[in-house]
Amino acid sequence: MTTPDKILYEAEMTASGGRDGRAVSPDGSFSLDLSVPKGLGGPGGDGTNPEQLFAAGYAACFLGALKLVARQGNVALPADTTITAKVGIGPVATGYGLAVGLTATLPGIDRAAAEDLMEKAHQRCPYSNATRGNVPVTLSVG
C-alpha cells in the first residue's frame, strides 16, 4: 500500500439510510437520493446507487490519467475521447465483491496505440491504484 506524501484535496460525503437513503456534501453543493436497483432486489427508482457513483468517478479519473499519459507521450487525443466504466457487484465467499470494465473510445487513434495508452493510464490512475489486487479491472478499446 502506498500512502500519499501529501494530501492535495479531500472530498467528503455523508450518507444516511444506506442504499435507499441520501448522500450529501458538507457544503450542500452535492446532494442526491439513493435507491436499491432492481438487480439487487430493490424497487429501482429515481435515485442513484454506489456502483453508479463509483463508475462515474472511475471513468472521470481514468480519462484524466489517459490525458496525462497521452500528453507525456506527445499523443493528441481527440476531443470526443471517452471512457465508459461498468461496475458490477455480485456475491463472493465473504459477502459481495466488485468487478470493473473500462472501455475507451479514441476516434482516429490506432488500436495498438490506444491499448498502450490504456495500460499506461491504468498504472497512473488513482482509482486503478486503489483497486489493484482487490478488484478485477478489464481494459478495452471500443
Image: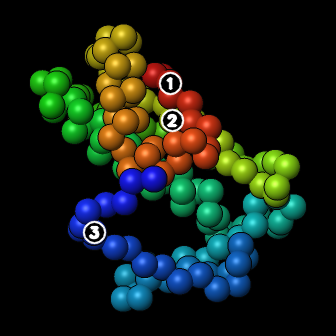
Q: Disc 1 versus disc 3: distance between alpha carbons?
A: 31 Å
Q: Amino acid at mark 3?
A: Ile
Q: Is residue 51 visible?
A: yes
Q: Position of residue 85 (x, y in %)?
A: 52, 42
Q: Position of residue 74 (x, y in %)?
A: 12, 24
Q: Disc 2 versus disc 1: distance between alpha carbons?
A: 6 Å
In which image quadrant can residue 50 be found?
bottom right
* Residue annotated with mark 3: 7
The answer to whether residue 98 is above or below residue 43 is above
Q: Nearer the viewer, mark 2 or mark 3?
A: 3
Q: Residues within 10 Å of mark 3 (few under 14, many from 20)?
A: few
* Residue annotated with mark 1: 140
Secondary structure type for disc 3: loop
Q: Are marks 2 and 3 in contact (CB under 8 Å)?
A: no
Dot 2 or dot 3: first in sequence order is 3
Instruction: Name the side, left or right, on which 49 lies relative to 63.
Output: right
Q: Are marks 2 and 1 in contact (CB under 8 Å)?
A: yes
Q: Amino acid at mark 2?
A: Leu
Q: Disc 2 versus disc 3: distance between alpha carbons?
A: 26 Å
Secondary structure type for disc 1: strand
Out of 13 and 122, give the one closest to the viewer: 122
Instruction: Name the side, left or right, on which 76 lies relative to 92.
Output: left
Secondary structure type for disc 2: strand
* Residue annotated with mark 2: 102
Q: Position of residue 119 (x, y in %)?
A: 39, 26
Q: Is residue 76 visible?
A: no
Dot 2 or dot 1: first in sequence order is 2
